Amino acid sequence: MTDTMFSEITPEVEALAKLCANASSIDPSLYTKYDVKRGLRDLEGRGVLVGLTEISDVNASYIDANGNQIPKDGELFYRGYNVKDLIHGRPDESHFGYEECAYLLLTGKLPTEKELSDFSGLLGKYRSLPTGFVRDIIMKAPSRDMMNTLARSVLTLYSYDEYDDDISIPNVTRQCLQLIALFPLLSVYGFQAYKHYHDGDSLFIHPPKEELSTAETILYLLRPDGKFTPLEAKLLDIALILHADHGGGNNSTFTTHLVSSSGTDTYSTIAAAIGSLKGPKHGGANLKVVRMFDDMEAKISDWRDEEAIEKYLRGLLHKEEFDHAGLIYGMGHAVYSFSDPRAQIFEGFVERLSEEKGLQKEFELYKTVERLAPKIISEERMIYKGVSPNIDFFSGFCYRMLGLPEQLFTPIFAIARIAGWSAHRIDEIAINGKIMRPAYKYVGDHYDYIPIENR
């Protein structure tokens, strides 16, 4: 079989695809008839309660004022601590908080100076791949999608682990710590391999430095000279903190619980979570935001012309602009209504970096869209709750200012979220509950078997 044949959709496949599509149609009214919570959500988009957690709390509740529910600013807590306080508690640019948050998510407590130093040192020691792994695994058949490369690398690490299937808490903790340490290497090295073999760029593989934080490691590995400013590293560190966890119900974390409940190994579980995060409805949303802004900037000559911006935004909702999907990307969230606390925290730091990079004009365009979009959406759509910018609205712009290639936008999310996935995996194993098995109701017909010669 040739490479072309492997990817070819033949007429035979086309015919089978039509049969598959016809066999996969369910009358939408049946979901209402049988009170099916499609997508594990109710009619207002709220998630169906399927578990309990003490790891993180997504608080988007309402203030009850004289019988009227008034939405309040959203809040995000890690193990009971407000993420806003975790970030602003140590504002100096020499302090990096992602490791502190990873320790908190895993252990349930804030580390002392010594505990944090020991934990960071442990991650530094684990930040080393098995001999020959870069050459034999990452350099072979590099994928154009770094999330696939990351998942393949994680699955392959199973082969290097003497205690691969041991799901005791100490062994799973060891595996999770190693994955937290290795995700930056697997992601950046995968990107470097792809750029070399597919685009002909020079190949450079910096060996990791134990003393660097996770944020510093990403920038050091990615840049040919390994250099970065304190503000660049600090902003990337904040992005990692804000993406480290988001309750147990988001798609990739729920995948972690779901797959862990089967009793499978850590590598299979985390690879499944990576597959979930890859989806454009989950981890790939910030790519849509920056590409939407690229399209907007190309079509609007004066970025201060609010009338032109408003016309473009309405065109998005009418499926006349960008990808014709009818969406203003980066606006709205499944849980938050009044505000996404991650976007609120991030915005000020992004503004500082835009000043350092001389991109204030671009930042002001983001601010204008942030102000206009909720009003336009409320006028054009029937919505059950408020709309505000989510973390994806600013993160792609931030990553571009940091010089991060678009292929690494979603892997950066995974590098952050592996801390949360690890905490939830350990949580699921410690509970030792039943394998998750939601129900699906059969609504098709029953038939008598027909011998093949009579069909």
Image (cartoon, grey):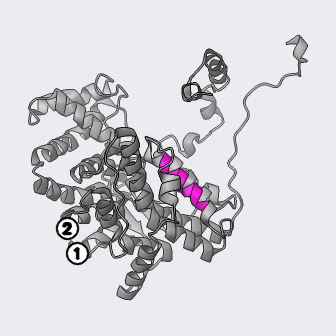
Q: Position of residue 289 (x, y in %)?
A: 30, 40
Please give left or right for residue 105 compared with residue 341 in the image.
right
Q: Where is residue 186 in the image (x, y as percent from the top left)?
A: 45, 57
Front position in the image: 228 or 241: 228
Q: In the rendered image, which quarter is residue 373 located in?
A: top left
Q: Are marks 2 and 1 in contact (CB under 8 Å)?
A: yes
Number of numbered discs visible in the structure rendering: 2
Q: What element does badge 2 sit on?
A: helix
Q: Residue 94 carries which label?
A: 1
In this rendering, is residue 415 above or below 17?
Answer: below
At 64% across and 32% down in the image, what residue appears? 33
The amino acid pointed to by label 1 is Ser
Question: What residue is rendered at 47% in x and 57% in y?
Answer: 134
Please name the residue that numbered disc 2 is placed on.
230
| Most common SS among magenta residues | helix
What amino acid type is highlighted by mark number 2?
A: Pro
x 31%, y 56%: residue: 222
Q: In this view, does 295 lie above or below 435?
A: above
Q: What span is in magenta?
A: 148-158
Residue 312 visible in the shown view: yes
Q: For this rendering, which residue is in front, 228 or 336?
A: 228
Question: What is the C-alpha distance between the residues marked 2 and 1?
Answer: 7 Å
Quadrant placement of the N terminus: top right
